[in-house]
Amino acid sequence: MAFRAGPGSEVANVSPRENARTSVEGMRDTGEEEVVLLCRSAWAGSQRYGAAVWSGDVDVTWRSLAQQVRAGLNMAMSADSVVDDRHRWLPRR
């Protein structure tokens, strides 16, 4: 895989980081001091840009709940934050 910026092995994962960096810099340039981004991907150092991982829209099934717990534990072990749709598991009134 090759991109304009270079070989895929070197630059394929640069896009999420640069997207987060430019978003944060743009918000700070407009006067925002505290910025939190919801991202669908994470990388080492993503906390630097206030990136919180969002697991996306998940199905309301027991299998999906098990997958979300597994993913959340893995993210917690990496010392990164995670945001998911757990609120959808609360009993409906």
Image (cartoon, helix red, strand yellow):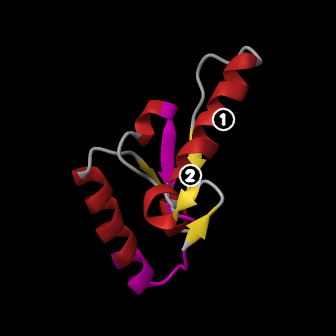
Residue 37 is situated, as x and y percent measured from the top left of the image, at: 59, 41
| Residue at x 43%, y 64% (from the top left corner) | 9
| Residue at x 51%, y 56% (from the top left corner) | 11
Above or below — where is 2 with respect to 80?
Answer: below
Residues tagged 2 and 1 counted as in contact (Cβ below 8 A):
no
Res. 90 visible in picture: no
Q: Quadrant of residue 81?
A: top left
SS category of the residue bearing label 1: helix
Q: Amino acid at mark 1?
A: Thr
| Residue at x 57%, y 65% (from the top left corner) | 56
Q: Amino acid at mark 2?
A: Pro
In the figure, is residue 36 to the left or right of 4?
left
Above or below — where is 37 with respect to 88?
Answer: above
Above or below — where is 31 with respect to 7?
Answer: above
Label annotation for residue 81: none
SS category of the residue bearing label 2: helix
Observer-nearest of 70 and 35: 35
| Residue at x 59%, y 53% (from the top left corner) | 15
Q: Quadrant of the N terminus?
A: bottom right
Label annotation for residue 16: 2
In the figure, is residue 61 to the left or right of 30?
left
Task: Give the residues in magenta.
Answer: 49-66
Residue 75 is situated, as x and y percent measured from the top left of the image, at: 32, 55
What residue is shown with label 1?
22
Give how far apart the Cα atoms at labels 2 and 1 are: 10 Å
Above or below — where is 22 with respect to 83?
Answer: above
